[in-house]
Image (cartoon, rainbow, N blue to C red):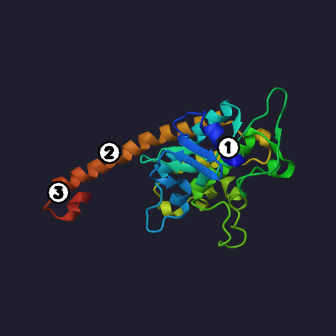
């Protein structure tokens, strides 16, 4: 009941393109009902881990989702709200893969005045919660940033934060990935193999470095969400010219093939018989 009221209290008064819209609710007697906007693509979790026969989420869409979720968190932090439950199942996607953050049942107001933290009972999802919060119950915005670092790691690797089906030593995503993230030449060991190499390695390096910073064991050394948004915007801007270059290259190949239609296929490579 408390979680449902928190969802209503926060989402009923907040508005942002990357927050899910709450259209109505019912809290009468035993009736508990929330009415949200319909988001046809479902959750990020389902795209990353429950694909079935579906295609893996493309790299550019993963970056779009990361940026949208980061903007939502930056907005919440500017309003002194800590969501406390950042995870892939709480990110829903519309028809254009725009990220919509939900899951405000554990949200709370952040510290005010001279306070440095909010003291609460430890709540959230195992694997995403910041280590200092688990140890002390002291909650700050930096706890959300740790959770976002885990989310970046899931997007980068295509692995669940906790996966007991994997070999021992690989079951806890953060512990397994952290050593690889520290060395640029080992980052490929972490990147989702289902992407088939269709990603920008320089962008992946930037995302890995950002994830490592968000996952820093010292909360004071983690970036702000505004800084995270800036880095992700930079990654997206850097990738756009690269995508245009590949697109133009594809056009040239198509034009070359068209000109040589009816000739031997060797002519495409500039050699062989005519």
Question: From the image, which quarter does the C terminus lie in?
Answer: bottom left
Q: Earlier in the sequence, mark 2 or mark 3?
A: 2
Q: Is residue 25 above or below residue 273?
A: above
What number of labels is visible?
3
Mark linked to residue 160:
none
Q: Which residue was labeled with disc 1?
A: 5
User: 88 or 56: nearer the eye?
Assistant: 88
- Residues under labels 1 and 3: Cα distance? 67 Å
Q: Which residue was labeled with disc 3?
A: 260
Frontmost of labels 1 and 3 is: 1
- Few, some or many C-alpha atoms within 10 Å of disc 1 (few <14, some 14-19, many ≥20)? some
- Residues under labels 2 and 1: Cα distance? 52 Å
Frontmost of labels 2 and 3 is: 2
Q: Residue furthest right?
A: 136
User: 244 or 104: nearer the eye?
Assistant: 104
Name the secondary structure under disc 2: helix
Where residue 98 appears, as percent x and y from the top left, is: 48, 44
- Few, some or many C-alpha atoms within 10 Å of disc 2 (few <14, some 14-19, many ≥20)? few
Q: Which residue was labeled with disc 2?
A: 248
Name the secondary structure under disc 1: helix
User: 59 or 36: nearer the eye?
Assistant: 36
Question: Is 141 left, or right, of 25 in this rendering?
Answer: right
Give the quadrant of residue 8: top right
Q: Earlier in the sequence, mark 2 or mark 1?
A: 1
Where residue 194 appears, as percent x and y from the top left, is: 50, 63
Q: Residue at x 16, y 53 (%)?
A: 259
Q: Are marks 2 and 3 in contact (CB under 8 Å)?
A: no
Q: Earlier in the sequence, mark 1 or mark 3?
A: 1
């Amino acid at each position: 009941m408390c979680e449902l009221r928190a969802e209503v209290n926060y989402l009923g008064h907040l508005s942002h393109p990357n927050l899910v819209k709450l259209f109505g609710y019912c809290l009468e007697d035993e009736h508990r009902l929330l009415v949200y906007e319909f988001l046809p693509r479902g959750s990020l979790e389902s795209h990353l881990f429950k694909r079935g026969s579906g295609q893996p989420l493309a790299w550019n869409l993963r970056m779009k989702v990361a940026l949208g979720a980061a903007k939502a968190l930056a907005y919440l932090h500017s309003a002194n709200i800590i969501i406390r439950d950042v995870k892939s199942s709480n990110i829903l996607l519309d028809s254009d893969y725009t990220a919509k953050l939900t899951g405000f049942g554990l949200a709370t107001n952040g510290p005010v005045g001279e306070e440095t933290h909010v003291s609460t009972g430890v709540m959230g999802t195992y694997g995403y919660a910041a280590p200092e919060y688990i140890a002390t119950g002291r909650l700050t915005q930096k706890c959300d940033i740790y959770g976002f670092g885990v989310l970046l790691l899931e997007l980068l690797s295509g692995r669940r934060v906790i996966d007991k089906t994997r070999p021992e030593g690989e079951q806890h995503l953060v512990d397994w990935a952290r050593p690889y993230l520290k060395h640029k030449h080992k980052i490929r060991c972490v990147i989702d193999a289902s992407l088939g190499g269709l990603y920008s390695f320089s962008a992946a390096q930037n995302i890995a470095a950002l994830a490592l910073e968000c996952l820093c064991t010292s909360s004071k050394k983690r970036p702000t969400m505004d800084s995270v948004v800036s880095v992700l915007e930079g990654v997206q801007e850097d990738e756009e010219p690269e995508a245009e270059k590949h697109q133009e290259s594809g056009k040239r190949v198509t034009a070359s093939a068209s000109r040589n239609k009816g000739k031997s296929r060797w002519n495409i490579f500039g050699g062989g018989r005519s």
